[in-house]
Image (tube, rainbow, N blue to C red):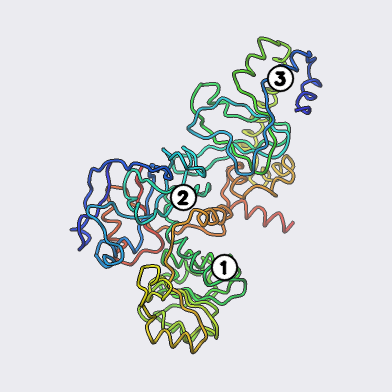
Amino acid sequence: MEELIEKIKSSIHLSFKAEEYIRSISKVKIVAKGATLIRQGQPVNKIYFVTDGCLRSYCTDKNGKEHTLQLAIKNWWISDYIALHNNELATLTIESLKESTVIEFKAKQLEKMFTRFPEYESFQRRILERHVVSLHKRILNQLQLTAPERYDLFLTQYPDIEKYTRNYHIASFLGITQESLSRIRVEKAKK
Amino acid sequence: MKALQIVKYGEIKDSLSFNEVSKPAILTNDVLIEIKAAAINPIDKSIILGHLQAMIPIPFPRTIAYDVSGVVVEKGAEVSNLEIGDLVYARVPQEQMGTVAEYVAVTSTVVSRKPGNISFEEAASIPLAGLTALQSLEYAGIKANDKVLIHAGSGGVGSFAIQYAKAKGAYVYTTTSTANVAWVKALGADRVIDYKTEDYKTIVKDADIVFDTLGQNYALEAFEVIKQGGKVVSVVGPIDEETAKMFGMADYKLPEELSQLCSAKEATYKFIFMHPNGAHLEQIKSMIEEEIIKPIIDKVYPFTESIEAINHLASGRAKGKIVIKIS
């Protein structure tokens, strides 16, 4: 919890009342490896801030195969924003890839924060900007980089992640088959 | 809901019928699965033909098949291992048989979440064959460097067993026909024996484990290739005394010839009666997600062509599993 408060304070002036409100609407949650926080097809009303560990959001297609959208490590926010924004059932499932610690917020209460403490809105805007930047980079990388280049970049962005992810988590994040990922790794090992 | 049902014993074309039946009701320990895919196995053919009516009497009409993948849409009050919306796979217990249908109610402890990297069709192809192979080879205590003979490497059980045995570090011999040699080799088998041109009994020596999936004389012949103190496990051979007791046949004795062969080689013979098990499916899920094991599918049929699918199975020519896509 303290990390998040410090993070907010480093970005905006957070009044004592605003800090108190944040503490009152959030709770720290330890999430066991393999546990599911949001489930595709179910209602969504929570947003999570990761303070430790790693969560994965993925969509299961009609054939039953998983496609990884986001891998959220320390200091990332994660939820099903499609469902929250459109007031729909979850499009994504969010699971914990290792024991993780998250700060859980009810989406509606977090929204009230904007009206009660307008200064918080600029913090939230910066989060969203960072999120958009990350998504744009991910799309551009997908369009212009080769699969081995994407894998290299992935490893710099997520060092150590291979210790607790399965191959198909990474392959489905990069948009390649598990066979291609194995080939890329073999080629990389030869260099 | 629509279901493919066995209405009497006999020829496949006369014994099956698509019927409109009520959606199964769940008990407190069950989940209701909306079926995406079902797979069929040789046992389904044997049931239809009436070969198993003494052991597994079927009250007609009864929906057929055991392998399933799909989505949990309801759960009983006491179910704690699964949630509504989970994508799952299972080999359903005998009393809940009936997966060529739109829904099936299944005891939650035999159900596992499906591997995330494969389709519903691929997931449905796994449970019965995978559990049979895993439980047989684990019963035999498979370990690294064991010499293992797996009969019928191109079958559903055999193709899974080869991959499982290789994952355990064993040296794998397998038998198959000429047409299947290449792809069975690609599964990882160390020595593929083409039974049309080679005699496996002259090639395999001192095996630690023989896994018989063929029956007839293969369980007896296993003792010619097994080492002193080896293990013969069979899913189709004569039942053993322990299994007989399980079925209430207290006076049953292992056939004399088999008993003598066991003594001569100080070997053990065990008939493996596969039991549905969610924890074992969890293990298999991990192995599939790590691509240690890959599903092998011969053909996927639409629900409306389920009877053709069973005829294909009965032909005995399938390379891998036959799956029925339900929705």
Residue pointed to by mark 1: B166
Q: Which residue is drawn at 30% across and 41% down?
A: B23
Q: What element carries label 2?
A: strand
Q: In which quarter of the image is residue B244?
A: bottom left
Q: How crowded is mark 3: few (under 14 residues within 10 Å), some or many (20 or more)?
A: some
- Give SS at disc 1: helix
- Name the front one of labels 2 and 1: 2
Circles 3 and 2 on the same subunit: no
Q: Which image quarter is the N terminus of chain A in?
A: top right
Mark 1 neighbour density, 10 Å: few (under 14) some (14–19) many (20 or more): many
B152 or A41: nearer the eye? A41
Task: State left or right for residue B228 relative to residue A100.
Answer: left
Q: Which amino acid does label 1 sit on?
A: Lys
In the image, taking residue B189 as reference, residue B63 lies left or right, namely left
What subunit carries mark 3?
A
Residue at the spot 21% in from the left edge and 61% down from the top edge: B9
The chain carrying label 2 is B
Asked if the residue at tag 1 contacts the one at tag 2, i.e. Cβ–Cβ closer than 8 Å, the answer is: no
> Looking at the picture, does residue A93 appear above or below residue A131?
below
Look at mark 2 in the image and give the residue it sits on.
B111
Amino acid type, callout 3: Ile
